Every structure is written in structure tokens, then in C-alpha cells.
Amino acid sequence: NKKHNKFTIGFSQCTGNDLWRKNMLAEMLTELSLHPEVDFHYLEASGNSTTQRAQVDTLIEKGIDLLIISPNEAEPLTATVKKVMDRGIPVIVIDREVKGNGYTAFIGADNVEIGEMAGQYLSQLIGNKGKVVEITGLSGSSPAIDRSTGFFAALNQLKALKIAKTVSGDWMEDTTKNILSKIHWQLKDIDAIFAHNDNMALGARKILNKYYPEKHIPIVGVDACFGEGGGLDMVYDGKITASLVYPTLGKEAIRTALDILKGLPFRKENKLSSIVIDSSNVRVMKMQAAMISSQKDDIYNQRKLLDEQKLVYKSQQVVLNTIIVL
Ligand code: FRU
């Protein structure tokens, strides 16, 4: 198998429905379109760690040469990653972490730093004083833990700025809306909100608009996804004040996977930094995102064209052979 550079890569995604995950998968597929020799198996666990453990077993049964996994929660998936590694199958952990470092490579961003940057940005915005609400992601997932740690560290140094309340929105807009509706009176005199992602930031904006339409409390989110309705659009449209870029890294995951499979050098720990997107730079970011996405479409189309040409060539060969036989 490996001698012919034919590889099977499995990808276990914790959840698949939001734009951020869709962007990640699209990047992977674009990169994979350049490597038709690679078989790719994709399963997504809809935010359920038990489902994800079973799906990894399914991928192993399919006979994968390498696993890419974004673990829904760190604790329940740590043993799963170990099990795969113990079988001699390399594992790339992407975005969310497991406990310890028993994997082949990690690709993601520094979520403690993201939390810190959000804290610094918000405190400057509201003059280093006031009350903020924090909306966290799923409590067992590492980015939620790390973003909280960083946010807390940034605000801890400021005496006049308090985290008035922390609620968990489990990364989802609807959960956030439900929970904030129940405590909406506690939002009356707050000065800002930090949500661990843009989906929850949008949920918070909707609730604030419903109960306190006269106020425009600043909200900072994370992801800054490109694509319709993503974080870049939210900032551009003024629904949220700012968002921190959380890179999706689909292309990097596939490239690293191929390096590992081909025995080429690779880096084990890959943690990217973020940047703040707000009204000062959102236009430029949107333009860049549009350019990149059209390049991606180009690659797709070229690949399709090549495949079509191959087909035409093959059928011409058939015609030729038939003529020769005749
Ligand atoms: C997408 C998402 C992002 C968030 C990331 C954390 O599923 O919820 O919004 O930044 O996962 O792992």
C-alpha cells in the first residue's frame, strides 16, 4: 500500500454543522483534490463524545493509515487517541486537545492567548472598568477551558473590571439564547460580553436586542469565519464588535498528514496566534477571504477539468483501439 504512495486518511470531526467546521472540511477537500491517490474517510459526531469514540473504531476497521481528530471533549477521547497510537497508526489532533501529548502532531491555535487578547481588547474598549459577562463553550472541550483561563488572567489585573457572570453556551447559538433569556434581567447593567465563539456572540446579541433594544453593548466573539453569515460578516454588519481569528487549518492538517505518511520531517506542536478583527480591518479581511475562496474554486475547477480531459482521452483511446481492430 504505502510503497505506491496510496494512503487512507480518516478524519473524526467532533461536530460538523457550523460554518467553521464546514470551512475546515472544504480546505481539506481542496488540498486532497491535489492528491487523488489518497482515500479519505470522514465521520462527524454531532457533538457527542461517545459517538465519536465509536466512529474512531469504525475508521480503524476501515483500515486507515493515519487519523486526524478534533476531539469533542478532552477527557473521554484521550484513551481513544492512545488506542489508535498503540496500534501504530499516527494521529494528528486538530483544534481541540486531548490530555497530555500522546499524539503524533497537534495543529491548532493558542486558546489561552485568544482569551487574553479578548480580555485586553474588551477592557480597553470600556475604559478598564465595569461588568462583563462571559459565555463559555462546552465545558469539557479544551478551547473553552483555555479561553476562560486567558480571559480571566487578563481581567484579573484590573481592579475595577469584574466578570459579573459566566454561563455556558456549549458553543451553540440556541443554547446561549435559552440560557440568557432565563437570566435576562442580569444583563441590564452590564458593559460588555465575551463569547467563546461567534455563534454564541450572535445569540447574545439577539437576546440583548430583544430585552434591551435601546442599548448597544459591545460583544466580542471568536472564529471570524469567512463565508455568508460568518464572524467576518457579523463584524462587518455591526452585529458584534470584534472577533478573534481562529484558524481552521484544514490544508495544514492534510499537508502534515502526507508528510508523516511519506516519512518526511514535520513539527509535532503547531500553535498559531490570532488577530483581532473589528471595524478597523474587517473590510480588508473580507476581501482577502473572498480572494482565497475564489482561488480554492479555481483549484477545484482545474481538477475537474483535468479529470474530464482524462475521461475524454480514455474514450478516444477506446475509439482508436476499436478502429485499429476494425
Ligand atoms: C466550531 C467551534 C468553534 C470554536 C471551536 C472550538 O465547532 O465551536 O466555533 O471556535 O469549535 O473547538
Image (tube, grey):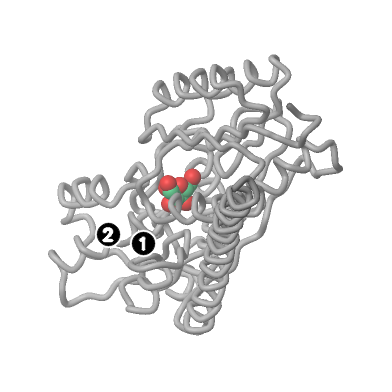
Specify whether tag 1 is near ligand 1 (CB below 8 Å).
Answer: no
Residue 48, given in percent of the width and then of the height, sits at 37, 29
Residue at the spot x=27%, y=49% of the render?
Answer: 176
Going by the picture, which residue comes out furthest to the front?
326
- Disc 2 marks which residue? 204
Q: Is residue 134 above or below residue 126?
A: above
Mark 1 or mark 2: whose residue is earlier in sequence: 1
- Disc 1 marks which residue? 193
Can residue 116 be seen in this snapshot?
Answer: no
Residue at the spot x=61%, y=62% of the render?
Answer: 274
Residue 45 left/right relative to 298: left
Dot 1 amino acid type: Ile
Label 1–label 2 contact, CB within 8 A: yes
| The N terminus - image quarter | top right
- Please identify the quarter of the rendering in which residue 262 is found: top right
Residue 239, given in percent of the width and then of the height, sits at 31, 72
What's the CA distance linking mark 1 and mark 2? 8 Å
Residue 171, given in percent of the width and then of the height, sits at 37, 46
Dot 2 amino acid type: Ala
Q: Is residue 215 above or below residue 31?
A: below
What is the crowding at mark 2: few (fewer than 14 residues within 10 Å), some, or many (at least 20)? Answer: many
Q: State the residue in front, 12 or 262.
A: 262
Mark 2 secondary-structure assignment: helix
Going by the picture, which residue comes out furthest to the left?
211
Residue at the spot x=35%, y=42% of the render?
Answer: 170
Can residue 232 be seen in this snapshot?
Answer: yes
What is the crowding at mark 1: few (fewer than 14 residues within 10 Å), some, or many (at least 20)? Answer: many
Q: Between tags 1 and 2, which lies in front?
A: 2
Residue at the spot x=53%, y=29% of the render?
Answer: 74
Mark 1 secondary-structure assignment: strand
